[in-house]
Image (tube, helix red, strand yellow):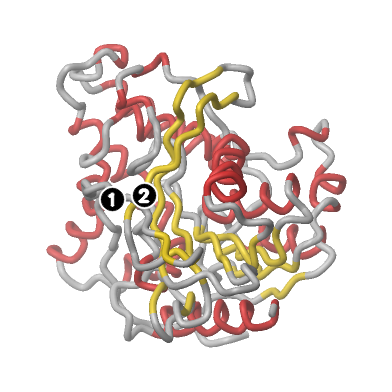
């Protein structure tokens, strides 16, 4: 077993940033630069049968589509993220090398530029699933960008949930799945954690049954304090030597949560809590995973207690073709997102993604 890297890290998360929406520039049939864009789906039908007119799907593009149109990679994000959350791994010479790949970074439903409860519907916005996210992304890729396939799709945590649903429901469309700190189904422990966070937000007097005029930031901050204890390992907390380091680590996620609209935040965690790729197959996980044709990179963190390596090992057993590597780190679930790009974790994840993408060509 690889030696655990004993380095102190402060919890880091990319804050939600308001973006200026620009149109995607197309020159000679090739998408250029790194611009924000929105794809509109005239009528989107959710898994539960609800419909939404003019569904927005926000995204960024990086690099250039090649003449064969076969170098597109879709980057998905974690539950607490947006399309820009994985930018540190995207660029010239990086894991998602923009000299080689046309990279599409997507906003899931309820994030960034995509449609969500905060657009005006509030709690009347349809409850959506990970599969709904993927179906909206497919519409963008197929009907918006006019691509007939993806070289790879994936990302961390909820990003890996999306990758698996891509592999199951669009098995001939994608060649590779990037599954970082992954699981095929949210555990009962994960359910309990999310339910505790949601109950905490609902205890905030500002919540007002979801019909608030002032965002319940106190509840969101305390929900983040609950979650960070599962995102990090015991060894990580033991490595914090000062009171200031400990307090910063404890509140960092809460401060980030406070930048979200609470309804957008809550709906996203509902979707992650209810994640189960076997649901459309009457709970038959073997049948669900057996539909995946794509090669998968499975990369759990050895110190993850939110989605432990055992969940990734289930994927390894259930998939036809996979590469399994564990991130050696004390950073817990967030091992894929260390404090600095000079860290061992960043190098480890970057190399594995780069090697995996090269193996698909």
Query: Residue at left 44%, top 46%?
Result: 79
Residue 62 visible to an observer of this rendering = yes
Rendered image: mark on residue 130? none
Q: Secondary structure at mark 2?
A: strand
Q: Secondary structure at mark 1?
A: loop
Q: Is residue 258 left or right of residue 318?
A: left
Please tell me which of labels 1 and 2 falls first in the chain.
1
Query: Residue at left 43%, top 72%?
Result: 63
Q: Is residue 78 left or right of residue 182?
A: left
Q: Residues within 10 Å of mark 1 (few under 14, many from 20)?
A: few
Rendered image: mark on residue 37? 2
Q: Is residue 128 left or right of residue 199?
A: right
Query: Residue at left 60%, top 70%?
Result: 299
Q: Which of these two is toward me, 250 or 48?
A: 48
The answer to whether 183 is drawn above or below residue 257 in the figure is below
Question: Which residue is the extreme one toward the left?
Answer: 244
For the image shown, how many numbered marks are present on the structure?
Answer: 2
- Where is residue 225 shown, x and y percent of the image? 29, 45
The answer to whether 256 is drawn above or below residue 221 in the figure is below
Q: Is residue 78 left or right of residue 171?
A: left
* Quadrant of the frame with the C terminus: bottom right
Disc 1/disc 2 C-alpha distance (Å): 6 Å
Query: Residue at left 46%, top 82%?
Result: 99
Q: Which of these two is toward me, 146 or 270?
A: 146
- Where is residue 250 shown, x and y percent of the image? 25, 54
Mark 1 lies on residue = 22
- Where is residue 146 shown, x and y percent of the image? 59, 52
The answer to whether 101 is drawn above or below residue 228 in the figure is below
Tags 1 and 2 touching, CB below 8 Å: yes
């Amino acid at each position: 077993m690889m030696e655990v890297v004993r380095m102190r890290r402060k919890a880091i998360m990319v804050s939600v940033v308001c973006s200026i929406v620009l149109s995607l520039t197309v020159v000679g049939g090739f998408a250029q630069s790194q611009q924000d864009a929105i794809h509109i789906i005239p009528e989107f039908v959710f898994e539960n049968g609800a419909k939404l007119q003019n569904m927005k799907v926000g995204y960024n593009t990086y690099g250039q589509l090649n003449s064969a149109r076969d170098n597109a990679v879709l980057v998905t994000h974690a539950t607490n993220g947006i399309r820009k959350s994985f930018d540190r791994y995207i660029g010239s010479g990086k894991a998602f090398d923009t000299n080689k790949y046309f990279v599409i970074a997507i906003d899931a439903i309820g994030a960034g530029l995509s449609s969500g409860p905060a657009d005006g519907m509030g709690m009347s916005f349809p409850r959506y699933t990970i599969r709904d996210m993927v179906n909206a992304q497919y519409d963008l890729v197929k009907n918006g960008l006019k691509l007939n396939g993806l070289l790879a799709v994936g990302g961390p945590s909820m990003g890996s949930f999306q990758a698996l649903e891509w592999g199951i429901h669009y098995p001939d469309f994608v060649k590779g799945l990037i599954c970082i700190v992954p699981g095929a189904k949210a555990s009962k422990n994960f359910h309990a954690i999310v339910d505790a966070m949601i109950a905490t937000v609902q205890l905030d007097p500002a919540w007002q049954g979801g019909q608030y005029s002032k965002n319940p930031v106190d509840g969101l901050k305390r929900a983040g304090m609950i979650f960070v204890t599962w995102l990090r390992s015991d060894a990580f907390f033991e490595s914090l030597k000062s009171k200031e380091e400990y307090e910063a680590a404890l509140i960092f996620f809460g401060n980030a949560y406070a930048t979200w609209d609470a309804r957008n935040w809550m709906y996203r965690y509902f979707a992650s809590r209810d994640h189960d790729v076997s649901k459309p197959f009457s709970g038959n996980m073997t049948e669900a995973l057996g539909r995946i044709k794509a090669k998968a990179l499975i990369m759990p963190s050895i110190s993850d207690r939110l989605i432990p390596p055992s969940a990734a090992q289930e994927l390894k057993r259930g998939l036809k073709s996979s590469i399994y590597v564990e991130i050696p780190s004390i950073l817990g679930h967030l091992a894929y997102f260390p404090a600095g790009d000079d860290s061992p974790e960043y190098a480890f994840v970057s190399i594995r993604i780069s090697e995996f993408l090269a193996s698909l060509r």
